[in-house]
Image: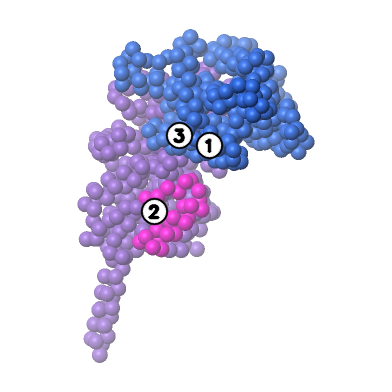
Chain colours: A blue, B purple
Amino acid sequence: MFDISMQALAAQLLVGLINGCFYAMLSMGLAIIFGLLNIINFAHGAQFMVAAFLAWIGFAQLPLLLGPEFKVNFWAALVLAPLLVGGLGILLEKTLLKRLYHLDHLYGLLLTFGVALVLEGAFRHFYGISGVSYDPPALLQGGVDLGFMFLPVYRGFVVVASLLICVVTWYLFEKTRLGALLRAGTENPKLLQAFGVNIPLMITLTYGFGVALAGIAGVMAAPLMQINPLMGSNLLNIVFAVVVIGGLGSILGAIATGLALGLLEGLTKVFYPEASTVVVFVIMALVLLLRPAGMFGKEK
Amino acid sequence: MQFKQLSVCLAACAALAAHAQVSDDVVKIGVLNDLSGIYSDLSGQGSVTAARLAIEEMGGKVLGKPVELVFADHQNKPDVAANLARGWFDQGKVDMVTDFPTASTALAVMEIAKQKNRIVMPSSGLATAILGEKCTPLTAQWTTNTYALAAGTARALVKEGKKNWYFITADYTFGHSLEKDATEVIKADGGTVVGSSRHPFPGGDFSSFLLKAQASKADVIALANAGNDTVNAIKQANEYGITRKQIVAPLLTYISDVHSIGLDKAQGMYLSEAFYWDFDERSRAWSKKFFEKQKRMPTAAQAGVYSATLNYLRAVQAAGTDEAKAVMAQLRKMTIDDAVIRNGKLREDGALVHDMLLLQVKAPSESKAPWDYYKVKTVLKGADVYPPISPACHIGQ
């Protein structure tokens, strides 16, 4: 069991880090939304999936419908798909979610869960369950030999890009005036509104931003896995565990926990792969027992 | 006196025979499969279309009685399947149920069908467990099974000198069964298994398993999984450059999987199938009919539903009754030969032993038309790839 070479270990840790980046990006969006809206966004996985499909539709279907000049390449999709998905998120917030803020968490959870099922069902109806395939952009194809492993360039890009997005988001929320307002809104929205801040608008835009983060992750995931209607819901279970471990509503917690659990999962796959999906939930149970507010959360 | 007895007997026998001919004045086929979940592309609505084509081919009637079709979504859950089938048998007048993309659902329904004297013909339910301890005399595993699929691919590759194998296996019954069956064949033919990894189901990211497989330096990386797991594993094997040095061999691949992976990534792969639409004139003619209705080429599972339904109806016709035991006896007497299945003989344990195809995925440049995906390498004789009758199956005891 312990005859694993250092090379193999390094390779597995790197692979774990790549997965951790996705956990971090997705759980960060969830944490932001929960922090300000008190909504547990169960539609997050479906929104991730929709963005991946939009990237593919722009690349493969639009040119057939409208002509070759409408082909949306990966880089354009990386901007456009999150904007579109974020826009749809804003529409959802404006029409449905905002009616639920005065009710229990459970209602928001049920609504977003329903939205997720509707989205998955709709995409399954039109594209089937096997899904479609999307290639990395030409610039990022191929790989480099790191000595201990062959690293596809695209995976390297995913690590760098998602760490960058995490840092920028963290900075935005923790170090800027806008972030201070958002955090104040989490703490005491009524008082902040009395100071003349447009709280409803702030909430709407925050939801849109959280969903757009899921969108970015979706487009980045598109070349790595088969795009299919269930790609998001498969990931979402783990991401929720990450959020709970990190502490609901904590951005730094979401990022750190996402990366750490990715690495831990990678390690488990080296020593005992059968446990790799369970390990995250074991940690979640332990954290809930010992620190119910999560590793980075504050007790209220 | 004697004459009177005889005539009473004659009248009674005639009445019995007329009664037993077709129960409820209708022959009813049930397609039970996954209409909305992960196996809906390989079975799903396409299987319903396939069954409908078989009924049309018989003119919608058998023994002068109408043939009807019902279908339902078992959601891959044995309890749901059992409830649906029970309702079909008790109130719905259903005589035969087919498809079952998850073998556990087939096993659940087989037990009920045995009590109710109805026939079960799994087409996409492939586990050899159906032929083992839980076998029943009223079951016909029509299209193929995990052993025949694994044997075809494994034997061909070992014969080419690819002797060292590594398995990436889905961690549930089906995956284990596929790995076990393939391992048996590989060892029997002089190959070795150098390692294996079990991945959670469903998988998503296969990087770490692929890296282990790569490090093992095995000649062949066998994928003992199905559907999206297979598709993702192949896609990621390409990404890590594995396919350039090692052979990736999926042990269960439907044409719907290759369609969604794309030829550029799947090219060169060996696989076994019970059916390929472009095999010969008859398979093409039937598949064309299917395509017109479904806008996709049939998977082997869907084609198998057609063949099962067609031969069931032929057997009812020939037996002169839809009584389950008589129909099964008739099916065992027949040589199965249609657009889908060739040289088929239904064995006592419920395995339909027939010719299988060893296929290789074409390169994009070799593919001349949509769905032109495979080269047929060899036709494998049923006797060479089907497992021997399991000693655990005690039919008639």
Quarter of image, res A5: top right
- Looking at the rendered image, the quarter that the C terminus of chain A falls into is top right
The residue that mark 3 highlights is: A119
User: What is the CA distance from the residue labelled 1 to the residue labelled 2?
Assistant: 48 Å
Note whether residue A8 is visible. Answer: no
Q: Amino acid at mark 3?
A: Leu
Q: Position of residue A11 (x, y in %)?
A: 64, 19
Judged from the image, the secondary structure of the residue bearing numbered disc 3 is: helix
Reply yes or no: does residue B278 show up in magenta.
Answer: no
Q: Which residues are magenta?
A: B71-93
Left or right of residue A231, residue B27 in this image: left
Q: How many marks?
A: 3
Q: Position of residue A158 (x, y in %)?
A: 56, 16
Going by the numbered disc 2, the residue's amino acid type is Val
Q: Nearer the viewer, mark 1 or mark 3?
A: 1
Residue drawn at (28%, 36%), measured in percent from left and top? B291
Q: In this figure, which residue is indicated by the disc labeled 2?
A: B97
Whether label 1 touches label 2, CB < 8 Å: no
The secondary element bearing badge 1 is classed as: helix
Quarter where residue B271 is shown: top left
Estimate the x, y position of residue B252 in percent, counting from the top left. Answer: 46, 35
- Pointer 2 and pointer 3 on the same chain: no
Residue extending farthest to the bottom is B1
Provide the residue designation for mark 1.
Answer: A99
- Asked whether A187 or B177 is in front, the reply is A187
Label 2 – label 3 distance at C-alpha = 32 Å
Marks 1, 3 in one chain? yes
